[in-house]
Image (cartoon, coloured by chain):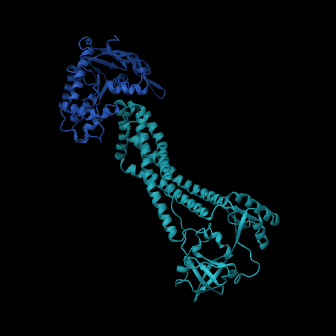
Amino acid sequence: MVLDRDVVEVSVKNLRRAGIRTYLTLIGVIIGIAAIVSLLSVGQGLNVAVTEQFQQLGSNTIFIIPGAASMSGSGGAMISLTDADLDKIASVKGVSEVAPIYTGAATMQYRDEKAGISIYAMDAEKAGVFSDTGFMEVSDGRELTKNDSEGILIGSSISEDLFSRTLETRKIVQINGVDYKIVGVLKKQSQSFGGGPSSNTTVYMSLEAYKRIFTGELSPGIVFAKTYTRDDVEQAAENIKKALEKKYGDKSVSVYSSDQLLESINSVLGIVTLFLVGIGGISLIVGGIGIMNAMITSVMERTKEIGLMKALGASNNKILMIFLLEASFIGAIGGAIGIVIGFSLSILVSVIGTAVGFSLVAYIGPEIAIGALIFSMFVGMISGILPAINAAKLDPVVALRYE
Amino acid sequence: MKDKGIISLQNVSKLYGIGDVTIKALDEIDLAICAGEYVSIMGPSGSGKTTLLDVITTMMIPTSGKVFIDGIETTKMSNPELASFRGKKIGFIFQTFNLLPKLNALENVMTPLWINGVPREEREGRAKMLLKEVGLEDRMYNRPNQLSGGQKQRVAIARALAMDPEIIVADEPTGNLDSKSGAHVMEVLSKLHKDEGRTIILVTHDESIGKKAQRRIFLKDGKILRTDEKHVCQLNGYGKHKIKHENIKQKIKN
């Protein structure tokens, strides 16, 4: 048996012997693996967060967004959905509820301070579509009622951070110059809603209240529809799309079921993560070249020793294995340290991210750790192949008398 | 003759190509060395002594010809077979000692033991016993740079004996030693031959060293110029070594 405990021990001893060179080589691997692990961890964390959010929303939800079929909604002619369109959506087979959301940006004034806010307005009766999502959980005060034409709900950040004084329930603020009374403050949310503005920084109001500042023909920014059962959702989405496109033309509107939306968001996230991990991978390649470099130097330094070992009965394969193992160990040890550092970095990123309002939880998964460890060992081994073959192929007579 | 000789070379040549010139380091050598024989290979530098030793020790494969050790044709063996064969049958003593500088004396002696797969629990005991035999029991944990030349060569001898080989080859073993240490090494070699019945092959250019052997083989330009007439195969048979072999195993156990 060529690979035995002795070969392993000798490889480890040799690495220790090489001292500073081993440590420097390790750093290269550590950086590469730490980069890959942290990016994967953050990317996966985002993925999990988005998925959880959509699961809360329920998989029988359909999103109807006026505009082209791209995530950002740009690139196509904007259309305005009318009340007739909403009725049409409601009449599609399987649809149980339709909740149009009207969005807008406005200026809020409190005493003599002014600040920009975003507004979500909906038919208060239909706010039930969201009540199970937890995104509009009221922590202080009450929920909106149907005829709340003056009451608003504010996000926690607006309450706490927007103005020098904390905004509390029963305070009066001016939005675009119109008086509104705060009836409730929402619980702080760690996630934004569907990738949109964080509910922490949004003002929610009823449609009646919205109409006091936004006049004229109202057009919803997004329409949520729910179906009776999950099985109806794909077919209903298809039918809604057909009906609207018949009126406005192809690609005039984007219709997704929540599963489809989740899928497309996650696939974009996946591509971005992959791209970043690829960049991390390049640094690991550099680390691998570092291993190769260190091993070639080591073989040259130990030429005489290799010759001696051959004289004492070591086969070419044994020599090969010793050097291959050394390279693999550098990979594995660097990988292990890199994994710890990578996860620490991703936790740091998530803590900082959450602190500045872009919340995510780093995903610390065993599959990332195991995958990274195997990968780093593999990189070490690949980098060690050439030097190890050089060592194994040394002519024992020449090596033994090498000065 | 082939059957009786523990080492036998038939028509062995080794050619080196340097540029367009081909050099015959060994030129159709026929040679037999008996079991338990003590021979010295002598000749001026460039005569092919070291090449001959490399071929005998299986470190070098000749360009043509056959080499037999114990009746086994080593020139036909694969690399792993050769390595294992060499590790167990042949002990090396070098002019420059070739101790591993970062290992202490004990670890140096243990090196052939792990390479050749001696069970872990036996290694330290055997290495300590060998170092004791060469008088270095109080130097076991010293590194080579803490040892004198003579002490280093004794560590090297202990290492050469670690696998209890039948053949000991010594390439200018006294070349880097003062005369007193050199004389001591030569005594040890004689003892290994006389008392333990091992085959000793000594390479030297030094006439006074070479004549300690039973038989001298003179090389010049890759050919055997002459050898001493003495033929000693009958005096020290293979059997005697075997007996000693058993003794050593006994000692290791104790």
Residue sitting nearer the eye, A10 or A21: A10
Residue ranking furthest to the bottom: A112
What residue is at 25 percent from the left and 22 percent from the top?
B245
Residue sitting nearer the eye, A130 or B228: A130
Q: Is residue B46 above or below residue A207?
A: above
- Measured as percent of width and height from the top left, residue A226 is found at 69, 65
- Measured as percent of width and height from the top left, residue A139 is found at 54, 76
Horizontally, is A366 left or right of B89 in the view? right
Colour of chain A, in one word, is cyan
Total marks placed: 0
Label the blue chain with its letter: B
Horizontally, is B37 left or right of A90 in the view? left
Q: Quadrant of residue B254?
A: top left
**Res A242 seen here:** yes
What residue is at 79 percent from the left and 63 percent from the top?
A243
Q: Is residue A121 above or below residue B16?
A: below
- Measured as percent of width and height from the top left, residue A350 is found at 50, 65
Q: Is residue B101 above or below residue A179?
A: above
Residue sitting nearer the eye, A212 or B41: A212
**Res B208 seen here:** no
Q: Which quadrant does the C terminus of chain A fall into?
A: top left
Residue sitting nearer the eye, A157 or A58: A58
